[in-house]
Amino acid sequence: DQQVKQNSPSLSVQEGRISILNCDYTNSMFDYFLWYKKYPAEGPTFLISISSIKDKNEDGRFTVFLNKSAKHLSLHIVPSQPGDSAVYFCAASDGGSNYKLTFGKGTLLTVNP
Amino acid sequence: DVKVTQSSRYLVKRTGEKVFLECVQDMDHENMFWYRQDPGLGLRLIYFSYDVKMKEKGDIPEGYSVSREKKERFSLILESASTNQTSMYLCASSPPTGTEKLFFGSGTQLSVL
C-alpha cells in the first residue's frame, strides 16, 4: 500500500517557466513533509519542508503548498532553470516513527533551455 | 557540513556471496538509515537505527541485516546476495528529536551477478 504517491513519473518544462510537482498521501498521521532532489549518481539532498500546521513554505525559487483536507502537497519552482533537472522525491513522516521517512516514487523533472 | 560517506560507489558481487556495505557519518547523529532505490519504486527503507546496538526493521528487511557497533558507523549486510538485490543503496543519518531531515550519502550501486 503506497502511502505517498507521486503520480507523474516525469515532467518537462521550458526554462523560465513554472514547474509544479505534485504529491498525494493517504496516511492521516503524517504531519511533516519534505522534498528531496536527486541528481544521477548522487544521494538525495534536502530541498524544502513543511509542517502540517502550515499551508505554505517558501525558500527562494521553491515553494511548497500543503492542502491537508485533500491530502495533497505540491512543489512550485519559479523560474525553472536547467540545473533544476533532477528527480524530485516527496517524503512524509508521522513524527512518532523514530523520524523515518516514507518516500514517493519520484518525478523526473527536465528543464529545457 | 554533514558528511555521510559510503565506502564504495560501485560494487559487483556473485550470487550467494556475503556482502558488507559500510556507512560512516561525522556529525554525531543518533539516527541512521539504509534505503534502496529502484527505478519506478522510489526509496524504500530497509533498516534503521536510533542508537548504538539498536536496530529496527523498515519496510523491506528480508534478506538483509545491519550492525551498529559505533555511533558513527552503520553497516548493511547481505547474508547471501541474490540478483534481486541489485540496486542503488543509500545510507542516511539524522539528528535526534525534532527533525526528520535526512542527510544522505552518495550511494553504492550494487550489482549481483
Image (spheres, grey):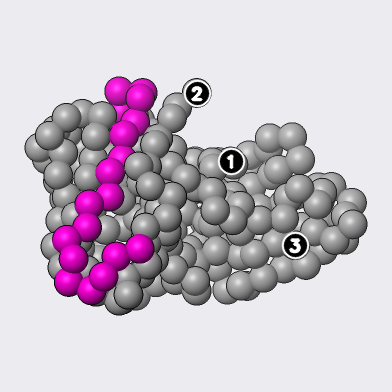
Which quadrant is the C terminus of chain A positioned in?
bottom right
Q: Which region is colored magenta?
A: B12-31
Question: Left or right: where does residue B15 sit relative to residue B24?
Answer: left
- Determine crowd level at label 2: few under 14, some 14-19, many 20+ residues with C-alpha closer than 10 A: few
Q: Do the residues bearing badges 1 and 2 touch, measured as CB atoms within 8 Å?
A: no
Question: Left or right: where does residue B18 sit relative to residue A65?
Answer: left
Amino acid under disc 1: Ile
Residue that badge 1 annotates: A48
Report helix, strand or loop for mark 2.
Answer: loop
Front one among B83 and A36: B83
- Determine crowd level at label 1: few under 14, some 14-19, many 20+ residues with C-alpha closer than 10 A: some
Residue B28 on the magenta span: yes
Q: Is residue A20 above or below residue B33?
A: below
Report helix, strand or loop for mark 3.
Answer: strand
Report helix, strand or loop for mark 1.
Answer: strand
Coordinates of residue A13 in the picture (x, y in percent): 82, 63
Q: Is residue B7 above or below residue B62?
A: above
